[in-house]
Image: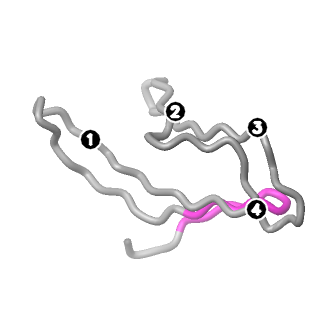
Amino acid sequence: MAEEHSARVASIEARLLSVRMEIDDDDEDVLEIEVLLCNEASVPLGGVEARVVTEDGKDVGPLVPISSLG
């Protein structure tokens, strides 16, 4: 990636690490997006739900769900 993409709200930072395009076994396009979430507060943040909404309105969740950031 040529430039960094990140956002911060209070003690939470989200940083885009990588985006990869692949074609799966069914010949469908697949985007693999890796995002680093960091909680710099001294208290863990619970009830975290990571979602991506595509431009056509499709709601996509992570392959590995998270429930808290510590």
Crowding at dot 3, Cα within 10 Å, few <14 / some 14-19 / many 20+, comes out as few
Q: Which residue is mark 3?
A: 47
Q: Residue furthest bottom?
A: 2
Q: Which quadrant, please, contains the C terminus?
A: bottom right
Q: Amino acid at mark 2?
A: Val
Q: Secondary structure at mark 2?
A: strand
Q: Which residue corresponds to mark 2?
A: 53
Q: CA distance from mark 2 to mark 4?
A: 22 Å
Q: Secondary structure at mark 4?
A: strand
Q: Residue at x 46, y 74 (%)?
A: 3
Kindly identify which numbered label has been placed on residue 68: none
Quadrant, the N terminus: bottom left
Residue 53, horizontal then vertical, whole percent: 52, 33
Q: Which segment did they paint magenta?
A: 5-15
CA distance separating discs 2 and 3: 19 Å
Looking at the image, residue 9 sits to the left or right of residue 66; the answer is right
Return the residue at label 1.
30
Whether pointer 2 and pointer 1 mark residues with C-beta atoms closer than 8 Å, the reply is no
Instruction: Please tell me how crowded label 4 is: few (under 14), some (14-19), or many (20+) other residues with Cα within 10 Å.
Output: some
Residue extending farthest to the right is: 42
Which callout, 2 or 3, points to the residue nearer the camera?
3
Are the two marked residues, 4 and 1, in contact with CB atoms closer than 8 angstroms? no
| Labels 3 and 1: the sequence-earlier one | 1
Q: Earlier in the sequence, mark 2 or mark 1?
A: 1
In the displayed structure image, the side of residue 23 where residue 70 appears, left or right: right
